[in-house]
Every structure is written in C-alpha cells, then in structure tokens.
Amino acid sequence: MIRAILIAAAVPFLMGAKAPETVDYRMALQPGAAGRPGLLAVEIRLRGDADGETRLALPDDYGAKTDAWRFISDLKVRGASMAEDGPAARVLRHRPGAKLTVSYRVQTAYEADPHWRGGLTYQGAVIRPDWFAFFGDIVFVLPEDRERQPATFRWGRMPKGWTVASDLDHGAQGQPLTVADVRESVAIGGAQVRVATRPIPGGTLRVASLPDRPIRLDALADQVAATVTAQRAFWGDGGGPYFVGVIPLVRDGTSKVMGGIGRSDGFALWSTPDEPEFVRWTVAHENMHTWIPRRVGRIAREQRGGGVYWFTEGFADFFTNRAMLKAGAWSVDDVVDRQAAVLQAYDANPARVAAGDRVKAEFFTSSDVQRLPYQRGQLLAMKWDEEIRRKTGGKADLSTALRHMHRHYQQFAPDQGPDVVTGLVSAVWVVAGLDIRSDIARYADGGAPIELPEEMFGGCLLARVTVSPAFDAGFDTAASFASKTVKGVRRRGPAWNSGVRDGMRLDAWTFNAGDMSRQIELVVRPPKMSSRAKPRKIAYWPYGDADTRTRRLELSPELTRDQRADCGRRMAGI
C-alpha cells in the first residue's frame, strides 16, 4: 500500500506535469558502507524570486540545539550562483523567475541508537544502518518568505524492502502541502518499520514504528485514534489524514523518558521501552497542539522561544484534561489527581516566581524553569475558568473563550490573525466582560505566585490551604551525612534542643527530607572518643520555628453520587 502511494506520487514528475508555482521536494537515502549509516539526499525544484535574488534558510536552531546546518553537506544549485550569508543562509542570484534546482545531503547526528541524553528532539536526523527518523525543521532547506507557498513532496530511491512513512505523504493523499508543512514534518523509515491504520473523523490515522519498539503498535494506534476522535469532537473541528511517528530511545540505566512534538497534522513520539503510563498523557497533550496554538492564534516574533509557553503548553494541558473528561476517556478522579499534582509541583518549584524573561532565557537549560510554564498555564486556566463562570452565572467558561478565539482566528489568512495573547484577552472580554491583562502582567510576565479560588465548579472542587510548622532538621544534613560527623547545628533549633551537638560522630540515621510525619533518628557517639564509646540514639520531630503553607486540590468529600457526576460535567465544560 505504501509503495503504491509512492509510485502514484511520482507520476507528475515523470510526465513533466508539475503544478506551477510550487516548491517541489524529493528525498532519497544513499546507503552507507556495511554497517554504517547512509545519507539523506534532498533535491528541491523551485522558481527563483522575480527580483533575481532568492534566499535559502538552512536548518539552524530548534529548541536547545543550534547549528543544525553542520549536518548539511554538498549543497549545490543549478540555474543560479550561490553565496554564503552566514553559516545558515545562502543567497542565490539568477535570472528573474528562473527555474532552480537545489541539492544537498544530510548526515546523521547520532553515531549510535539515540539515548535521551543526546538531545534527540533538537539535534538532527537519526540515520542508522537499518532505519532513520527526522523532523523537518532540522533537515529541510527552505526558501525564505515562502511559508505559505504550495509544495509537493515525494520519496526517491530507498533500500530494497524498506517502508517509509511521514505526514509529508498527505500531499499524495489529497491534502495540499505548503512549504511550512514541509518544515513542520516528521518521518520514519526502515527495513522493519510497520504502519498501523485506523479510521478517524474526516480521515485516516497512520501510526508508524519499529516493530513494538518501544510501544506495542496496535495498542498505540487504538489509543491515538480514540484521542483524536475525542479532541476533534471537543473542538467541533479537524479532519483529514493524521500521522504519528514513533522514535525509540535506548534507556540509560533506570531512566524513563517519553516526549513528543506536535505537528499540524500529527506528531512525533519518542520513548524508552515499556512506558504505558506515559503514553496516554503524551498522546493527548501532543494532539491538543493541533488547536493550541495553531488554530486559535499565531505566535508573534517577540513571543517565540518560550515567551508564551504558559499558553501553548499550560493551556494545552488544561484542555487535554477537559476534552478527555468530556469524551468519557478519563474519569473525574484522573483529572483531579493530575491537577492536584500540578498544584503541588508548582508550590514546590524553586523557580515558581521566575519572571517571563527568565523563562525564555532558561527554558532549555533549567529543569525547574522548563516545568514552570506548564504549571503556571494550567493554574491560570483554572483561575480564569472559574472567574468567567462566576462572572457569567455559569453561562460561559474558558472553553467558550477558546472556541471564540478559534472561530475568530479562522477568519484570517494564515498567520495574519491576532497573536495568542491578544486573542485570549479579547475573547475573555467578549464572552465575560473580564479583563485579564493585569493577571497576565502580574503572573505570566511578572512571576507572582498564583492564587486559586478556595472553591471551584460550584463548590465541588476545593483548593484547601493548611498551615503547619516548616520542616527543619536543625543541622547541616548534607555535610553531616557525607562526613559522618554532625555539622552546622543551629542553637535552639530542634536538633540542639534534643541534645545534638557539632562534632558528634554519626553511626546511622533515619532521615526523610521534608517528611513531617516521621521523626529524625540519629545514632551518635561523642566526639574525639574511642570507637568503643557506647552509641546512643536521639530521635526528634523536625518542626521548625517558621510555618509552611500547603495547598491541596481535592473533590469535596460531601458530594453525593449525583453531585459528583454533575461536578464532572462542569469540569468537562458541559
């Protein structure tokens, strides 16, 4: 079936019936020497700009990694002269509107099967002796300022017996491609690649993976089909083919990793083996990116690089929960448990008050900062959802505002509508007369701690606050345990009051940082005494002088069965 599609796609090239004013891409694989990775060979046919100068943008930065052009070689052009304008740009000079042919090769960024530590998502193509995978952002050379120009794609020669699959195949299946779609693509190919298909509303789903590596293919295809169906129903929008490429990662020790990158008509999923618990969430989150932000607003230049991740990622998480709850795919307890975990993680995040500028600067270098916009965006969504509901007497909620954003944005030409922040502010004002600009400035940009209403969804969901003594060991635990000698005892602290003193030798200890439910137990001997000195046990509660404030999200324990069901409908936006 795959080969038949590829042959059909090749016919226009063979007959010279290429549609006018398209940028035409072709990719083949040049096999390497025995046991060595090959090279991806790319050819682009296009017409030059009318002024006689066309600029090409080479793959450069994507996420945390830069200089993806390092993996591009043998870049040539027919029909024009070519000059460098920095390592990631070329200037072609030619007759106005001349026919141009650009060719180059792409080498692997990985000399072994990829591990998570290698930065798979952002580094370059994975080309192994028997399989390959790539994201278009870091493989394809693009003509500048032509994102919306129609494009075509076809596969060239591949090793005998290989199967290749990509959302780039959608062009051959009747869904028009643009240059932007080529850039925002994902592909996988290999001797053992399998493709599972499922019907979905408005099209067909294809999931491509190495055989049950790292996830059982048929089970994953069922999961994705159910998720896509639920989320298209939630938005009342979406159709056409959908593709998921699964890229395996080698596990480093006991580490478990799963992640994804949403594409306009699918997504890439990568995972270490045997991660069934991660699959459900990752699939649902990445598919939500079909709408958030792509179909509700554009990302302005100054917002790129993490500036609005609180919206693009945090809101995607919030509406993932809502859509899957509405479809009955997840339970009320599933959603509350997830949101409670987000609140707990946010309150414990050392970067919780990082301003928006710091998020942009450190998103790819600090794990605490990287988690923050996901947490911050979900909590802002919960806050505004409740405020809209109260302001409108339950007639509208945040879903109403996002659907308004969606309808409004679809009235504009691609990339010409309002940016996501402007669109959100406008939509919330239209549906509820609520001005959230000060909240955005205070919380998203300024980093102030987010407060939630104590009761939400008519009182069925509670954000309870408890105040208790802060955890305090009373001495320098890290230095003491490392040297097996007590250090840093604070006068009049809990350890001091229990008889612990600097210099005591530590034979054993029971210590759980942050745990107020158990005593700290130390087995000590006096300092500077014989090893035959009798040890003694000191146990004490790690209660400090300061108080700590803890928030917990939970369903009201007083709900009847009917009230619980009604709460679920409200949380689902029904």
Image (cartoon, grey):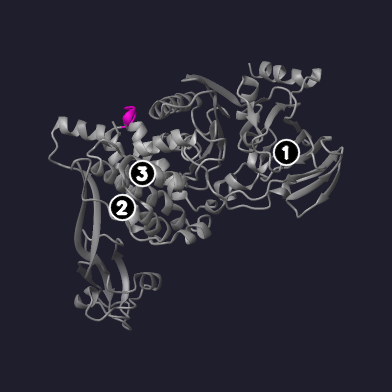
Q: Earlier in the sequence, mark 3 or mark 2?
A: 2
Q: Earlier in the sequence, mark 3 or mark 1?
A: 1
Q: Position of residue 129 (x, y in %)?
A: 70, 35
Check whether the beta carbons of the residues at disc 3 and disc 2 lie within 8 A of each other.
no
Q: Residue furthest bottom?
A: 528
Estimate how packed mark 2 is, as few (under 14), some (14 to 19) or many (20 or more) residues with alpha carbons within 10 Å: some
Q: Say whether residue 457 is left or right of residue 256.
A: left
Q: Which mark is residue 428?
A: 3
Q: Say whether residue 518 is left or right of residue 98.
A: left
**Residue ID at (42%, 28%):** 227
Q: Nearer the viewer, residue 257 or 142?
A: 142
Position above or below: 370 against 8 = below
Q: Position of residue 197 (x, y in %)?
A: 53, 20
Q: Looking at the picture, which amino acid does disc 1 mark? A: Pro
Q: Position of residue 426 (x, y in %)?
A: 40, 45
Residue at label 2? 344
Residue at label 1? 37
**Residue ID at (30%, 74%):** 475
Magenta stretch, overall SS: loop
Residue segment shown in magenta: 326-330
Position above or below: 459 against 345 = above
Mark 3 vs mark 1: in front: 3
Q: Looking at the picture, which amino acid does disc 2 mark? A: Gln
Disc 1 on helix, strand or loop? loop
Q: Say whether residue 284 is left or right of residue 413.
A: left
**Residue ID at (16%, 33%):** 563
Disc 3 on helix, strand or loop? helix
